[in-house]
Amino acid sequence: MKQFDTSLYFITDSGTYEEAEFLARIEAALCGGVTILQLRERNKTTREYISLAEKVHKLTKEHGVPLIIDDRVDVALAVDAEGVHLGAENSRTQSGSTEKCRLVFICSNCLPHLLFLISLKFS
């Protein structure tokens, strides 16, 4: 199983920022030493989420930092992200889709401070 450096795990969303400002902030975080980045977008359409994730992934690749997509297996697959983070609720609803992902992070409600890494092969 591939090991990720989670010493500076950055979780972000674009919130109220214009896209250029948001991407500049992502770049600054990457230059500042972020070791893994999770993109969490709750208020975007699938198309908008994929578009933004592609731009963020371009930046993370330039810095050698893995991109984790929050809650959306479809978006993670579309942008070839290094992983997807699924909470307990999402892991039940998208479990069939996870078989195509390389790495899935599943957060347990019982143990909120632990991430379980499950290595999955491409189908």
Image (tube, rainbow, N blue to C red):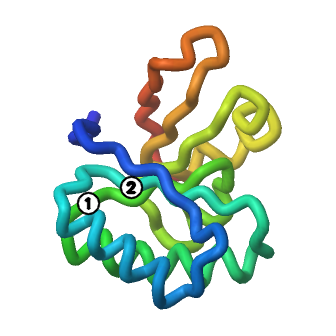
Q: Determine contact: label 2, label 1, CB under 8 Å.
A: yes
Looking at the image, which residue is at 18% across and 56% down?
Answer: 33
Residue assigned mark 2: 37
Q: Secondary structure at mark 1?
A: loop
Q: Is residue 82 above or below residue 95?
A: below
Mark identifier at residue 65: 1
Is residue 70 rendered to the left or right of residue 32?
right
Q: State left or right for residue 107 relative to residue 109.
A: left
Query: Left or right: 96 with respect to 27?
Result: right
**In whole angstroms, how far apart are the C-alphas of marks 2 and 1?**
7 Å
Q: Quadrant of residue 9?
A: top left
Q: Position of residue 90 (x, y in %)?
A: 74, 38
Residue plotted at (51% across, 57% down): 12
- Label at residue 83: none
Between 9 and 87, the one nearer to me in the picture: 9
User: How packed is label 1: few (under 14 Cα within 10 Å), some, or many (20 or more)?
Assistant: some
The outermost residue toward the top is 110
